[in-house]
Image (spheres, rainbow, N blue to C red):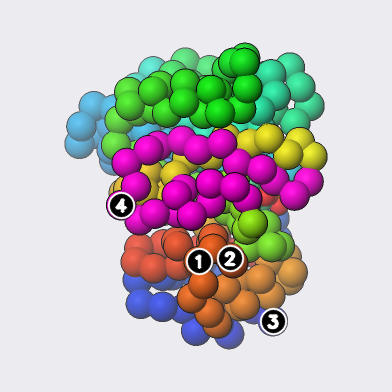
């Protein structure tokens, strides 16, 4: 199956690439263009990215783009509640692959804090995110269960975190796999981004997307909250 075979809602578009390397490069060029347009228009640009396994090549390409990185603010759609030195830390992933060379000059807002417990860490991240400027570019990933960011089906707090008009910016969440303790930006904050990208590769993610498009229970597949205008899907087999 190819993404062109899916019937996407109006305002949702697809960019298809031959392989993960080409997707990473194409996506990095597009994101860099959106960030530089934001800098030109308003002096600064804000980028929110996802972690997980697949974004490494995208981060490496993006870090090489000639951008005025001192005027870029970067944060994460979600984080595992582990210190930056931990192998599962999304902040650690960013430090290794995106905040390198000239891109190291970007300002990074971390969701993680060594608070007494996950709830307090989420409250602290929520306060910190009040300083986050309007998100210019958001890059989401998607799991095979239809989660995006750390909005996991069946997690405590999911209903609140998925409220379209929710005021809170960050929620504590529980993932089905370790590390289970997560921090996620809320649907409302993520959805406020000016440019929204969903980056997925492989047939199984396309099958998940197909299933998500076929229903409307957002709690069952939280990615459904973002399958509406406007979203650009970057995909390769
Ligand atoms: O920190 C994380 O794990 C994420 O932000 C998560 O939402 C991720 O984007 C998906 O699980 C897809 O991950 P992959 O792209 O690595 O499959």
Asked if residue 169 lies in the magenta stretch, the reply is yes
Q: Are marks 3 and 1 in contact (CB under 8 Å)?
A: no
Of the residues under marks 2 and 3, which one precedes in the sequence?
3
Give the alpha-carbon distance from disc 4 to disc 2, as whole Å: 18 Å
Residue designated by label 4: 165
Which disc is residue 218 wearing? 1
Which disc is residue 68 wearing? none
Nearer to us of marks 3 and 1 is 1
Residue designated by label 2: 221
- Residue 61 appears at what percent x and percent y? 59, 38
- Residue 148 appears at what percent x and percent y? 57, 53
Of the residues under marks 4 and 2, which one precedes in the sequence?
4
* Residue at left offset 63%, top offset 50%: 155
Magenta stretch in the rendered image = 155-177
Of the residues under marks 3 and 4, which one precedes in the sequence?
3
* Residue at left offset 34%, top offset 47%: 166
| Secondary element at image label 4 | loop
Q: Are marks 1 and 2 in contact (CB under 8 Å)?
A: yes
Q: Is residue 224 above or below residue 64?
A: below
């Amino acid at each position: 199956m190819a993404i062109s075979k899916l019937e996407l809602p109006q305002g949702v578009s697809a960019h298809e690439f031959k392989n993960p390397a080409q997707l990473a490069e194409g996506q990095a060029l597009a994101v860099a263009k959106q960030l530089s347009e934001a800098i030109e228009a308003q002096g600064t640009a804000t980028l929110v990215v996802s972690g997980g396994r697949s974004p490494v090549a995208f981060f490496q390409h993006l870090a090489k783009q000639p951008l005025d990185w001192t005027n870029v603010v970067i944060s994460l759609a979600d984080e595992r509640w582990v210190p930056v030195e931990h192998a599962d830390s999304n902040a650690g992933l960013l430090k290794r692959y995106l905040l390198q060379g000239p891109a190291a000059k970007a300002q990074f807002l971390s969701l993680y804090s060594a608070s007494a417990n996950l709830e307090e860490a989420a409250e602290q991240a929520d306060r910190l995110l009040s300083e986050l400027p309007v998100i210019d570019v958001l890059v989401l990933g998607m799991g095979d269960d239809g989660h995006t960011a750390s909005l996991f089906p069946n997690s405590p707090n999911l209903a609140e975190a998925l409220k379209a008009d929710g005021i809170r910016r960050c929620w504590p969440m529980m993932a089905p796999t370790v590390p289970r303790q997560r921090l996620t930006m809320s649907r409302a904050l993520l959805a406020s981004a000016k440019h929204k990208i969903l980056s997925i590769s492989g047939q199984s993610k396309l099958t998940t997307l197909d299933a998500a498009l076929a229903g409307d229970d957002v709690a069952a597949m939280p990615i459904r909250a973002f399958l509406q205008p406007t979203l650009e899907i970057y995909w390769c087999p």
